[in-house]
Every structure is written in structure tokens, then in C-alpha cells.
Amino acid sequence: YEICACLVGSEMCIRDSGYIGVASAFFLLTFYNVLGGLVMRYMMGFLLELMGVDGFSGQEMSFWNYILHDYGSIVFFNILFVVCNIVIVMGGIQSGIEKFTTVAMPVLFFMLLFVIIYIATLPGAGEGFIYMFKPNWEPLSTASGFFEVVRGAAGQMFFSLSLGMGAMITYGSYLQKKENLEKNALIVVCSDTLVAVMAAFAILPAAIALGGEDAAMSGPSLLFVTLQDVFAAMGSFGPVFGLIFYILVFIAAITSAISLVEVVTTFYMDKAHAKGQPGNRKKYTILTCLAILVLAVIVAADGLGSNGLWQPLGYCWLDFMDLWSEGIMMPLGALFMCIFIGYEYKVENIAEEIEQGGNVFRTKKVYAVCCKIVVPLAMFLVLFGQLQSFGIIK
């Protein structure tokens, strides 16, 4: 699928790749930016702690419950995160996105490595590593459990690899013809897997060492509740590692967010170019982010579903946006992409494009089978699992 995405991007402009990926990126950002803003708030909290100021407490309820109901703060940091998106994407590919990621990615890697080494020294960290790698077959014993595992794995795949949302297509359109797409796809998948495992090493052992297996939650609870307790249990070192950790999360979040903003921005720039009009990057970046911000403010004001605003179709606003992006558009877009590549665009054209510049398409036969049969079937199962998890299919 990585090869499909990069190739379609290099062969066609984003406007011809379909609207599903662009819409998926848009809806995803309406709640992703809210979470990014919360990460910035936690960064500020640990920075205040280092300065000797109380950065989290002072309220009768837990800070997590408090911040979800503090409309002013959650909306403000949501806006601040969106502004960061605007500043970076307006700079363009080389002066904005590439310049930022060239510095941010190595920093992310080495800071993550530093945190892993420290976490490994904590008493009880070994239990965390055992918990991570010990197989648990129970969820696979039922059909519903199987689809839940598939859904979770698919969500991780789509989010971490930016699949089904136009990001690979957009970035692929900037590649030179001589690029080895097969090698690049392998590097992307291996690098992503490595960093994901490193992130698990940095989080789960610490959570279990200091809070037991009950602390191994998922989603916002793990990121904003369990880990805050972990850092609090570290004593005087807690604010230092808390600040480092949330800086890591911020770098990961902002690099993902700008890739999705670039998808929507490039879409409208290409539409302008197709009409013979100049594509004003700054204008389309600002308009894109403002449109996203309108819906993101609603998600923020709803407190990620905890404040009881009007629920569209019976879902809280976060789940409603997640339904359209992760639940429907990502697997559906990936399904359509592979059907188009396998049966309309043809693998022979793929091979001709990949082999430019003297490159060899070593996995052509495997790729053809995967693109025509394996991946479409897998995406159908993922789509079924997603619709089932959101209660659309019983």
C-alpha cells in the first residue's frame, strides 16, 4: 500500500486521487488538534513544576477531569496547536515541513532512547516488558474479540503510517522519478515499527512498574492520567522526565498534524492550478486550518465527550469525527485505492514507474497478489470491524 500511495502521488496530482483521503485527513484533524493542544498544556504544566509553580493541582477533582471541563484552557491550547500547524505548513515543503522534521525527528529518536534507558532501570520495569511480550490469546477466542483486535491493529496502522488519508499520496507527489519507491516503502514501515516499539518501551514498563497492570490503559487515559501518576511517583525527577516525555509526544503529534494539513492544502492548491490560477499556499493553509478549527473547537468544548453537548447520531463529537475518518473513510479509501491500482491502473504500469532510474521491482509478483486480493480482503475485514465497533453493524 505504501508503494501504491507513493506511486499514485508521483504519477498524478492529489486532485485525481479521490476525495475520501482528503476528507479523512480533514475530519481526523478536528479531534487530533484537540489532543495536540492537551499535550501542549501538559508540557506547560511540567515546565511550571520545574519553575517551582504548581502546574496541575489546585482543583478538587483530578487535573484530567478538570482540564476537560475548563473550556477556556482546552480551546486556547487547541488554537495554539493549530497556529503551530499554520506556521510550519505555510513555509512550504523545504522551508517549512522538511526543515522542521529534519531537526525534530533526530531529537525525537534520541530523547526517546534516553527515556527508555531510564525507565529500564526502574524497579519492576521487567514486569512491564513481560506484560508487553507475553501473548494473550483470549481476545482471539471469539469473533467479536477477533474483529476488535483487527480494528485496533488497523487503527494503529492507519494512524502511524498515515494511510488512507492522502498523506503518502501528497508526499509521494514531491518525489523525483529516480527514487526507489520499493526501498522507501520498506524504510518507512520498518522505521515506523521501530519507533512504535520504542514508544512502548518508554511507556508500558513505567506504567506497570509504578501502577501495576491496571495502569496499562489505552488512549487518552494512558497518556494523560496514568503517565502523570508515573511522573509524580518519580519525585524530584518527575517534572524533568514529564517535560521531556510530552515534548516527545508534541513532536510526534505536530509532525503528523502538519502532514494532514498539507494534504488538504495541496488539494486546493492543485485545484487552483488546474483552473490556471496561482496556488497561494499561505491563503489555503490558513483557510484549511480555520475550517478545521471550527469543528475542533466543538470537540474541545465537548471535553472529548465528557461535557454532554448535543450528540450527532448519538455519538459524542470526538467519536462522530472518528467514525467518519478512522471508521469509514480510511479503510474505504484504502480498499478503493488497491482496487484501482490492481484492476484499473494495472500492476504493469506500477512496475514501469517503479523501475525508472534503473531500479528493480523485486517484489512485483507478491505485490500484484497483495494489491489484487490480500489487501482488498483485509481492508474489507477492517471496514467491517470498524463499523461493528462503532455500533453501525451489530
Image (cartoon, helix red, strand yellow):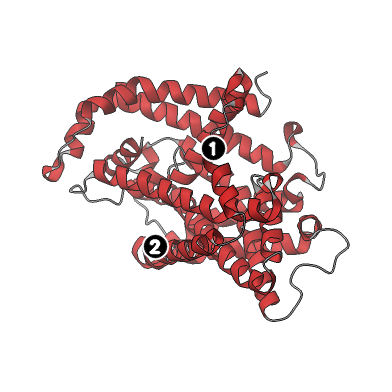
Report the side of 376 relative to 74 (left or right): left
Report the side of 152 relative to 260 (left or right): right
Q: Position of residue 330 (x, y in %)?
A: 50, 35
Query: Where is 42 relative to 23, above or below?
Result: below
Q: Quadrant of the N terminus?
A: top left
Amino acid type indicated by mark 2? Gly
Q: Say the numbered circle drawn on residue 92.
A: 2
Which residue of the protein is positioned furthest toward the right in this rendering? 60
* Total number of numbered discs in the rendering: 2
Q: Position of residue 88 (x, y in %)?
A: 46, 65
Local SS, label 1: loop
Q: CA distance from mark 2 to mark 1?
A: 45 Å
Query: Where is 252 relative to 371, above or below?
Result: below
Q: Say the numbered circle drawn on residue 134.
A: 1
Crowding at mark 1 (Cα within 10 Å: few <14, some 14-19, many 20+): few
Q: Quadrant of the C terminus?
A: top right
Local SS, label 2: helix
Pick the residue in front: 9 or 192: 192
Amino acid type indicated by mark 1? Lys
Residue depicted at x 30% and y 40%: 12
